[in-house]
Image (cartoon, grey):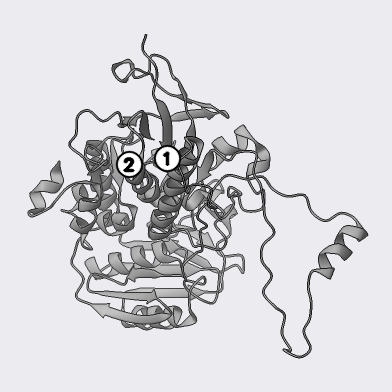
Amino acid sequence: MYSSPKTVVVLGAAYGGCRASQILAAGLPESWRVLLIDRNSHMNNVYIFPRLSVLPGHEHKAFIPLSKVFLSEDPTLLHRCLQATVTSIRRDSITLSRAFPEHGLATTVVPYDYMIYALGSLMPPPLDLWGTDPADNIVQAKPGRNLPVYRGTKSEGIAWMKEHQKIVEDAPTILVVGGGALGIQFATDIAAIYSEKKVTLLHSRKRLLPRFDEAMHDETLKVLETMENVDVILGERLDMSSVKEQPVKHNELGQRIVRTVTGREIASDLLLMCTGQTPNTGLLKEFDPATVNPDNSLARILRTMQLSVLTAPLTSTGELEDALKQVIISEAAASIPTLEEPPMETPYPHIFVVGDAADAFGAIAAGHNAYYQGEVAARNILHLIRRSEGASGEDEPLEQYTPCPPAIKVSLGLDTAVFQSQGIVGRRDGASPDLGAALMWPAFGFKITDDDQMYE
């Protein structure tokens, strides 16, 4: 009689999910399998999306096939990468949008022993390939091109990028809203590629890239000020009612007019809303609302990357007094000592969350952080499996995750980038037009020696 293998499901095949799957595939006992599930047929390298959705000729490089994701050619392995949408989560099973009888999954319900939730975040509208209404991804002054419908294939992704490039090319003036990395990349790339276009960058705060060192703002602003076709407006927030109001307001040139909350009117032929990402935690909230923080929509986790639940606030005077007693002020040292975090337990020790969906102790939402969180989660699952099978030496505590200092690299036009790493802020020149797209492919099993290989 056929016995279903023990299963680790990994939801999401981006930076964190793929890395976790690779560690699991290399370390699981022979009777175990990894099921890596993603709605895309490929990995979307979103860090080069802004550039490739503006600059023609490189769009195919952003979509990396998942056919070699486990980094093994061994056909006897049980691990599989499945293209499907996860529709619901339960404590011991998930439901998919389709069955895979060819892989022994006769129904859409897939039991699991461990899960890694790595579904990341939903992209801002200008890069939301999965937007439910393609016409709403961007706001054009006049009825024009619509972005094609995307359902998760590489060919559809390429078509989407090409159409986005044409929409940008057709717009004489462009308003980019949001002074984070995405908005800055869009504004500077468009200005560099199309010197005849007027680009306006609107940001609600006085500082660009506010989560990073102030020197990042300074370096970025210096470059923006050298671009004659870019206007930067800081400290003013877009009035969203002016975007949605009907009838649409136009000027004598046919440009669409929106306004800030201070009343400043801005006219443009194309509006790109680059105002942040939304954590993709809806499935977790449906599974157990207590696992998602209502203040930021992020999943509550332990430092082991295990899913947890929100703790109840201090409600009584006695509880508050007890908490305050733990803070001891040392007059001799004239400082407050660092207190160890209290031990925490979870009702879901077999479920882990990594990447942009996780409330990971101050870690910024970034691919490199998801990658390292995926490693911690995978190693802890292997540890738990060995412990359950009675392996010696496995009574040690699980590995804990500590965020790295904030790090980022932001392109400023075609040739320049500003970066922050290990507390150092600087500027680099000489970037490749495709932002080194081929560098990501080996992490998914592809050795690239020629650009044509990235058409796969």
Instruction: Report which residue position mark 2 lands on.
Output: 147
Q: Residue lying farthest right?
A: 317
Q: Could you say which is closer to the camera, residue 182 or residue 115?
A: 115
Q: Residue lying farthest front?
A: 392
Residue found at x 70% / y 78%: 337
Q: Could you say which is closer to the camera, residue 388 or residue 237?
A: 388
User: What is the distance, in whole Å, between disc 1 and disc 2 at their CAs?
Assistant: 10 Å
The quarter of the image holding the N terminus is top left
Per the image, label 2 sits on a secondary structure element best described as: loop
Q: Provide residue 28's location: percent of width, then percent of height.
A: 36, 38
Instruction: Report which residue position mark 1 lands on.
Output: 131
Horizontally, is 68 left or right of 382 in the view?
left
Task: Say if 235 sits above or below 304 in the image.
Answer: below
Label 1: how many residues lie within 10 Å, few (<14), some (14-19) or many (20+)? some
Circle 2: residue type: Leu
Task: Say if 116 sits above or below 30 in the image.
Answer: below
Per the image, label 1 sits on a secondary structure element best described as: loop
Circle 1: residue type: Gly
Residue found at x 39% / y 81%: 425
Quadrant housing residue 238? bottom right
Of callouts 1 and 2, which one flags the residue occurring earlier in the amino acid sequence?
1
Task: Say if 250 sits above or below 221 in the image.
Answer: above
Q: Provide residue 60's location: percent of width, then percent of height.
A: 19, 47
- Mark 2 and mark 1 in contact (Cβ < 8 Å)? yes
Horizontally, is 236 left or right of 382 in the view?
right
